Image (spheres, rainbow, N blue to C red):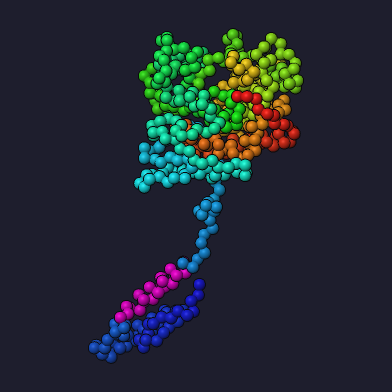
Amino acid sequence: MVFNVLVFYGSAAGSWCPAREVTACCLSCTRGAGHRLALGAMAQRPWRRTGLKHPPLVALGVLLALALLALTHLPPPPTGDHGRARSLRMAPAPISLSPAPRPRQDTATTLCGDKPPARGTRRRQGDSWRLRELGMPSPSPCVERPCRRGDAQHGDRLRLGGTAPPWLSDDDIQKMKLMAYGQVVSKTRVPAHGQVLRVHLHAEGDPQPTGPQGDCGDGRCGLIKRPGDLYEVVAFHLDRVLGLNRSLPAVARRFSSPILPYSYTNGATRPVIWWAPDVQHLEDTNNDQNSCALGWLQYQEMLRTHGRAPVVGDVPCKSIQHGEWGRLALFDFLLQVHDRLDRYCCGFEPDPSEPCVEEMLHEKCRNPAELVLVHILVRSSAPSRLVFIDNAGRPQQPEAKLNFRLLQGIDSFPETAVAVLRSGCLGRRLLESLYVDRELWDSQGGAAGLRPLLRTLERRGQVLLRYLQERNLTAVRDTPR
């Protein structure tokens, strides 16, 4: 900015100097003062009589004032939708479900950020991150729900005070409380699963177990899995948000029971999955992870004929409704679970470190007649519906290696799940649901730590929607829970 009207009062005669000539005027004043001192020692300097400081100091002060005045006239910086300066877009952070450092006791952890913490309370970066800042599409059908905080104490593992998300049933909440708070009264090893313990849990108010190890037939047992299987807890909430309702309730928990080995009580957060006592297993010890033996070719034929063709010798498979396979395929594709429908990794090029390569299963892809399905399970209480177990899929699976073989032969998908994917609400609802599980939320660094995972699931959902559109596939009405 140019200021032509500003002048400086600095000469010996009291004349006004233009601002652009301040330096010359100051030099002139200095020379005039020296000349008067030579004429007489009693002569007073004019700037002393007028109350002015030494001219160079005054010039410096004026220059600083001009600079401050110019700064006040600068235009404001560009801002985003919320009044904050726009930041550079960063590459998505790698997804990790390994336990993050636990928050301080004075950390204020909120989901919606609609109520600021009390003065003096420290806020951990990311935990007050608003749902609408996920960076994901929010079409008009997706209306942000009001934040519902529980009234639980800080030490509680579940935030279930007040109203729970509507996709969690009363039965879900009851089982989640058992998994989160139940006292471990016994433990047993699970055959062929060395790092998994089945524990009997006793909740306050429940009758004492009848035997020394308890009876898991009473529905009060859970499986404690490895810390690396925490993705199963996310899978449970994904199942409920999508309205599939086929996975078993799961929570994250840290244990301190003296009954458990030290590796289970060293402070690591582990997933606990409810043990369904009525899941049917084949008597064949080599194939006991199925309710029915089903090969890939049989499976494809059953999908093509909508189950009207008989599956020889497999009565449980005959009872499974056709729509169940669409639920399973959609769920497994979003999570990239290969163990059920493609344990041989035939739908993508696996890395040499993949179990399907190390166990030489990938070589069987050349002969489809040798391919079998695994973890195809039903419950005796609901033989027409599948039950999803071992849902720790692959959050790190890149989009270039998404396994579309999981969708092969499927001609329809559940209506409610497709509607959630189209609405753009998946990430927001998942965040609200995961907030209920305090242990999982804190171990992953809150909303900021879960953000990459939610974006990955959203992107996979959009890929699935394009797949449906390109093949003109339909969405069918859901079957009862």
52 relative to 360, above or below: below
Q: Is residue 78 above or below residue 359?
A: below
Residue in the foreground of this view, choosing between 88 and 82: 82
Closest to the observer, 124 or 91: 124
Q: Is residue 347 magenta?
A: no
**Residue appearing at x 59%, y 8% in the figure:** 283
Principal secondary structure, stretch drawn in magenta = helix
Using residue 334 as the reference point, say whether residue 108 is left or right of it.
left
- Taking the spot 68% from the left edge, 20% from the top edge, the residue there is 321
- Name of the residue lying farthest toward the bottom: 39
Image quarter for residue 323?
top right
Number of on-image labels:
0
Q: Is residue 240 left or right of residue 60?
A: right
Residue shown at the point (55%, 36%) measured from the top left: 429
In this rendering, does residue 25 appear at all?
Answer: yes
Q: Is residue 354 visible?
A: no
Question: Which residue sits furthest left?
Answer: 42
**Residue nearest the observer in this picture, 463 or 88:** 463
Residue 164 in picture, x, y percent from top left: 50, 33
Answer whether residue 55 is magenta in the image: yes
Q: Position of residue 397 (x, y in %)?
A: 59, 32
Q: Looking at the image, which is closer to me, 370 or 170?
A: 170
The image position of residue 55, as x and y in percent, is 35, 79
Quadrant placement of the C terminus: top right
Residue 396: percent from left, percent from top: 57, 33
Residue at the spot 32% in from the left edge and 78% down from the top edge: 53
Q: Is residue 481 left or right of residue 8?
A: right
Magenta stretch? 51-71
